[in-house]
Image (spheres, rainbow, N blue to C red):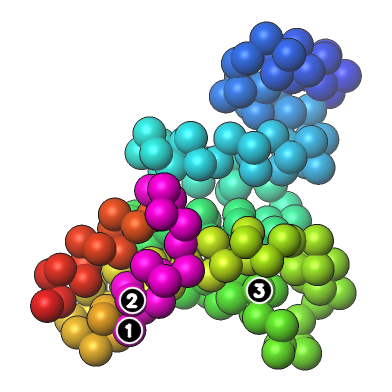
Amino acid sequence: MPKLHHQASEWYEQNGFSDEAIEHALCSENFERTVHLIEGHVDVLWQRGEFTKLRRWLDGLPVELVSSKPQLCIFHAWSLLIMGQRDAAERSLQIAEQALDPSTDHITKTSYRERDKLPDSDRMKLRGRSATIRAVMGWYQGDVPGIIKHSTQALEYLPKQDSWRGPAADVLGSAQ
C-alpha cells in the first residue's frame, strides 16, 4: 500500500492536484516528501483559510520533523491559535523563533541546518509571520503595547505583497 500511495502522490503532483498529492504522500508515510509538498502549498492553504486541513496534515507528521522546519512551526502555531490552543501555539512559535534566531546557541543541529539553508529574505518573512502571530496573541490577551510592538515589527519584516500583513495591520488598528 505505501508504494501505491507514493505512486498516486507523484501522479497527483504531476497533474496539479496538490491536496491529493499531500494526502497520498502522508498515507505512504514518506514524510520527507509530505513536508516538501506541504511547504510548496502552505501559502495557498493559508490564503484559502484551510487551517483545519493544514493542521491535520501537520499532526500526521512526526513532531520532530515539523519542529525542524520553522515555516511549518509558524503555520502550526497559527492553526493552534485559531483553534484556541494558545499554550500549544506558544510552544510551536518558540521552536520556530529559536530556529530563526542567529544568536540562539541552544537549538538543535537540525534547526541550525534549516536556518542556514534559508535566504535572508525568507528568514525575515518568517520572522514577520512570527511577529504577526505574537501580535494576534497580544490582541487575545489585551496587551496593547505587545500588539503595537509585534504588529510594527511584522509590517517591517514582511514583504509588501505578503498576505500576513493583513492580520498584523488589523490588530495594530484595533490597538490604536
Q: Position of residue 93 (x, y in %)?
A: 52, 71
Q: Which residue is mark 3?
A: 100
Of mark 3 and mark 1, the one earlier in the sequence is 3
Q: Which residues are magenta?
A: 149-163
Q: Position of residue 76 (x, y in %)?
A: 52, 56
- Residue drawn at x 81%, y 21% as measured from the top left: 6
170 lies left or right of 3: left
Q: Which residue is mark 1?
A: 149
- Quarter of the image where the N terminus is located: top right
| Residue 47 drawn in magenta | no
Is residue 18 visible to the viewer in this orientation of the structure? Answer: yes
| Residue 156 drawn in magenta | yes
Element at badge 1? helix
Element at badge 3? helix
The disc placed on residue 152 is 2
- Residue drawn at x 72%, y 52% as measured from the top left: 62
Callout in the foreground (2, 3): 2
Secondary structure, magenta segment, majority class: helix
Q: Is residue 149 above or below residue 67?
A: below
Q: How many marks?
A: 3
